[in-house]
Amino acid sequence: MKDSELKALAAKLDECSACPLRGNCIAPVGWFGDPKSPIVFIGEGPGAVEDDHGCPLIGPSGQLLDKALWSVGMTRDKVLTTNVVKCRPKGNRTPTVEEAAYCGSVWLERELAIIEPVAIVALGSVALKYLGNSDMRITRDRGKWFKTSQGYDFIATFHPSYILRQYGKIQAKVKWDVYYDLVAARTKVLEKLPGYEFSSGRPVDLFSIFPKRPGAGGQSGA
């Protein structure tokens, strides 16, 4: 049921041209993973690699996310990953609050209503502010539990792209912060769904599932 509902929503998303972002990308990028997943990871928006392949978090940031998930016993095919904004902003810039508010209200809210997750992990500031409020700060509010306006429990952690920009001891600390946040999210789900299997037992090769789309360019971006 959830699978068919998400497929129908994806078909509508493919036709979306409701905002100016659509003119600067190949096509919208939807979501990937298990429609029945009790946990959803929400990033900010597609980068160049995501736009090329039509998969959220498949570029360098997504590859780092895969490693982080593997460290806590999760694989991408057993959870669900998506973004607040569905079209790549020109130049891989960070989506604005206004862009996130519009696209999230049109598409993300409909995704979540279908999935009905037990827990959401907000990856970075854009997702944190969209799910919470514009006064929230990732450096202050990560690792804490909040509720969205629709009543979903969510925790924020650093976006993988932020980790990639750090070095040395700072990067090591941030990686541990993300690890503990992911453990907290996993624990939250298991409190309601004891025994849920977060892993299929093997890393997922997203590039074999999502070849380049027509019109795709190089492999730059986050």
Image: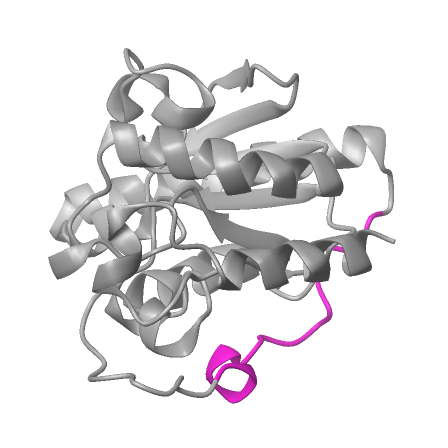
- Picture layout, residue 218 above or below residue 8: below
Residue at horizontal 74 percent and vertical 41 percent from the top: 114
Q: Position of residue 96 (x, y in %)?
A: 22, 34
In the rendered view, does 10 fall on the left or right side of 115? left
What colouring style does the render use?
one colour
Residue at horizontal 78 percent and vertical 36 percent from the top: 190
Q: Is residue 214 visible?
A: yes
Q: Is residue 205 magenta?
A: yes
Nearer to me, 100 or 74: 100
- Picture layout, residue 97 above or below residue 169: above
Q: Is residue 11 magenta?
A: no
Q: Is residue 72 visible?
A: no
- Picture layout, residue 12 above or below residue 178: below
Query: Which picture quadrant has residue 128?
Result: top left
Residue at horizontal 33 percent and vertical 37 percent from the top: 124
Residue at horizontal 63 percent and vertical 18 percent from the top: 150
**Numbered range of the magenta stretch:** 196-210
Seen as rendered, the residue at the extreme top is: 135
In the rendered view, does 99 fall on the left or right side of 103? left
Q: Position of residue 13 (x, y in %)?
A: 53, 56
